[in-house]
Image (tube, rainbow, N blue to C red):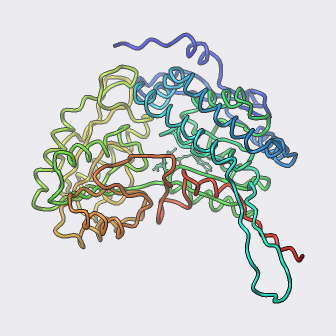
Amino acid sequence: MTYSMSPSVKQRLSQPQRLLIDGHWLLASDGNVSDVYNPSSGEVIASAASATAADTELAVAAARRSFDERTWTGLTPAQRGKILWRIGDLLEQHGDEIAELEMLDAGKAFNGARHGEIPFAADCFRYYAGWCTKIEGSTKDLSTVPNQDFHIYTRREPIGVAALIVPWNGPLVQAAWKIAPALAAGCSCVVKPATQTPLSAVRLGELMIEAGVPAGVINILLGRGSSIGQLLAEHSKVDKVSFTGSTEVGKRIIDAAKGNLKKVSLELGGKSPVIIFEDANLKEAIAGAAQAIFSHAGQVCVAGSRLYVHENVYEQVVQGIADLAKNMTVGPATESGFDMGPLISKGHLNGVFQMVKAGQEEGARVAAGGRMIEGQGGYFMEPTVLADTNHAMSVVNEEIFGPVLVAMRFNDIEEVIAMANDSQYGLAASIWTQDISKAHKTAAAIKAGILWINCHAVPDMAVPFGGYKQSGWGRENGYEALLQYTELKSVIVKL
Ligand code: NAD
């Protein structure tokens, strides 16, 4: 079905997307805007204000003032919880419009966004709404001073001003994963969406104001990561930076944060292994492995991009996944019925294609795909399976962040554990077997922050999410994420 833009989105996109600073929606102070592209067509669909250093100063100052004046923390925890809950309700109420924005901006299929991303982001706000009233300290007994009475307690306090830097592959959900726990903890926030995907963040900002988040507590800066993202990471009045993006930029954030030793949490890249043992339910494992890599065209941090299959079933599994890949339809996210949509940009498509070429030159066999799909305007890549790869190849070691699976065979459990762990990354993994002991032993041995057994990429707000090794610092989701927006204070009282 051919897509026709809804009147509300048309109206929204006819104006430049604005910055939210201290409750006001503003153009950049120098009037600069950048183009926003639809990756399904390659067309410019909107423009967005491109914040300057002066705008960044204003946003940080607004967040700082609102935090220091207790604009947000002065509300009771229950009042804050109600506001967060209301954001979840508003997201669902406006779900059709926001799903349309995610489709246009990030190349997400409408139904996937409407029934996946939107309710998930709404649940994120509701999950953390519940935590607002449950942030607690503890009491302790002193051992060091005998024969005297003491009262000792700890307090969890909000860390202060949090800069929240978001990538383009999950614009709404990744923003929610940061904003909701930061607000629940009592922080004031400056959000920096990815340059490519500002649309849903702006709409979310409007809904947060409508829900009752006070001016200054939530600020949104659109623009370039290398300028304003960098400034936020460096800023002496920012107490915390939470960043999701590439490992390369993550390292820059650490350098930038050194000035005031702000707290840093990082959700970075991955090269997650999918391990299929001989005794797995192969039909499910083949479908699961294909889904793990081709979902959102592989532009998923936990994409199952390295496949390890027991040698006795290797040919069968690789052929099965390759057959599924060859049968997948690829086309614009704006039209229903395609199995896979576009990559985010022309530059990214070229990068993915170059990686595939390098893999072939290094000796990989193309079992499916391998080519760009041209002639549709957008940025499309065939679902690709590279077989007979090995750990000396760049396609095995580097994150491709596209629909490209590299397949390898293994002989026994020790060998596959060693191969799976032979990576700079440690974000996620999945294990496919019907032997429960083997599953748990392998899960314990894999160095990754999240393990799935007989499934892949099943998310939940209560489940901590983050990386070992160069996949990051800290965790998102669950109580663990909330703690990362707090400081712990101990109080010792002599009675
Ligand atoms: P990116 O690192 O280029 O950009 C991420 C964000 O950082 C964007 O908002 C960008 O504008 C900003 N940025 C860029 N340079 C900056 C700088 N010098 N200082 C501060 N901010 C800067 O990554 P991307 O291309 O947007 O996203 C893809 C990457 O993100 C992949 O590596 C993927 O694995 C990773 N990712 C990880 C997770 C996770 O949870 N671990 C989730 C999604 C994406």
Asked if 292 appears above or below 469 in the picture, the reply is above
* Residue at 43% over, 29% down: 115
Where, quadrant-wise, is the N terminus in this rendering?
top left
Residue 489 vs residue 263, the one in the foreground: 489
How far across and how far down the image is residue 297, in percent? 35, 38
How far across and how far down the image is residue 37, in percent? 50, 27
Residue at far right of view = 495
> Viewed as shown, does residue 257 lie left or right of 455?
right
* Residue at 67% over, 54% down: 485
Location of residue 349 by image quarter:
top left
How far across and how far down the image is residue 59, in percent? 77, 40
* Residue at 74% over, 31% down: 212
How far across and how far down the image is residue 446, in percent? 36, 66
> Viewed as shown, does residue 123 lie left or right of 159?
left
Location of residue 92 by image quarter:
top right
Asked if 349 appears above or below 437 in the picture, the reply is above
On the question of residue 225 being in view, the answer is yes
